[in-house]
Image (cartoon, rainbow, N blue to C red):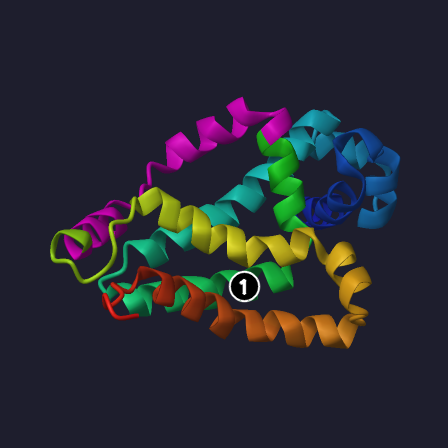
């Protein structure tokens, strides 16, 4: 692994744990197995290193979701795929949602600039939802409410993990099983919520 990649990997873990203010360059250098001078050679400041880590996080999350939303697949299959892939992705990077959400609040200009540069929007998904509403195959739904519902239902258990474990008594193994079950639960909740109900129901 290249030195720069080692630095970013170590910095990612420390920034995820301690945030920008709590992280120290010496700590990142130690975790990378290099001296501080070499760290500063690759990244002249903590801010530049932080931006590299943050950009990596956004670059991982955003294009994956956009690709899934814009795929050439039926709406129900697409929703199922987004839920499954996104939960799997966060399961491998459980500290990432809090990290990105914190920076969306504290440094929105940086993230917005990078998202604009990626120039990806869920246009296919939007058209698909609007067509389904027009054809009366789903209830009237604003596409971005639907996107927010999907992402929120996937992300929340990771953000609220300590609270959920406290309330339920779940240990780590239980929580992993709970997350695995969320894929089917979230998918069915979203799809059932979109169904046009019979007047007799």
Looking at the rendering, in which quadrant would you find the C terminus? Answer: bottom left
Between 182 and 9, the one nearer to me in the picture: 182
Query: What residue is drawn where x is 35% and y is 58%?
Result: 68
Query: What residue is drawn where x is 78% and y is 36%?
Result: 38
The correct choice, above or below, for 45 with respect to 2 in the image is above
Which residue in the structure is indicated by mark 1? Answer: 87
Between 1 and 159, the one nearer to me in the picture: 159
* Rendered location of residue 29, percent (x, y): 83, 41
The correct choice, above or below, for 104 with respect to 123 in the image is above
Query: What residue is drawn where x is 47% and y is 68%?
Result: 84
Looking at the rendering, in which quadrant would you find the N terminus? Answer: bottom right
Residue farthest to the left? 135
Any magenta on residue 56?
no
- Quadrant in the picture for residue 142: top left
Badge 1 marks a residue whose secondary structure is: helix
The correct choice, above or below, for 20 with respect to 33 in the image is above
- Quadrant in the picture for residue 102: top right
Report the magenta stretch's main SS: helix
Q: Which residues, given as a range, are shown in magenta?
A: 105-132
**Left or right placement of residue 50 versus residue 40 in this view:** left
């Amino acid at each position: 692994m290249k030195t720069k990649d080692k630095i970013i990997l170590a910095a990612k873990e420390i920034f995820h744990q301690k945030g920008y203010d709590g992280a120290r360059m010496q700590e990142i250098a130690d975790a990378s197995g290099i001296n501080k001078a070499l760290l500063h050679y690759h990244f002249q400041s903590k801010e530049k290193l932080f931006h590299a880590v943050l950009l990596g996080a956004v670059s991982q999350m955003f294009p994956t979701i956009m690709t899934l939303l814009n795929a050439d697949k039926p709406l129900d299959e697409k929703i199922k795929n987004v839920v499954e892939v996104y939960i799997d992705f966060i399961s491998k990077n459980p500290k990432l949602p809090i990290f990105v959400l914190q920076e969306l609040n504290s440094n929105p200009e940086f993230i917005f600039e990078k998202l604009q540069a990626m120039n990806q929007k869920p246009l296919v998904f939007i058209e698909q939802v609007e067509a389904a509403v027009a054809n009366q195959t789903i209830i009237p739904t604003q596409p971005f409410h639907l996107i927010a519902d999907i992402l929120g239902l996937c992300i929340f258990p990771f953000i609220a993990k300590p609270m959920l474990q406290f309330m339920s008594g779940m240990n780590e193994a239980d929580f992993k099983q709970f997350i695995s079950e969320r894929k089917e639960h979230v998918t069915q909740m979203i799809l059932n919520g979109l169904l046009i109900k019979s007047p007799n129901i």
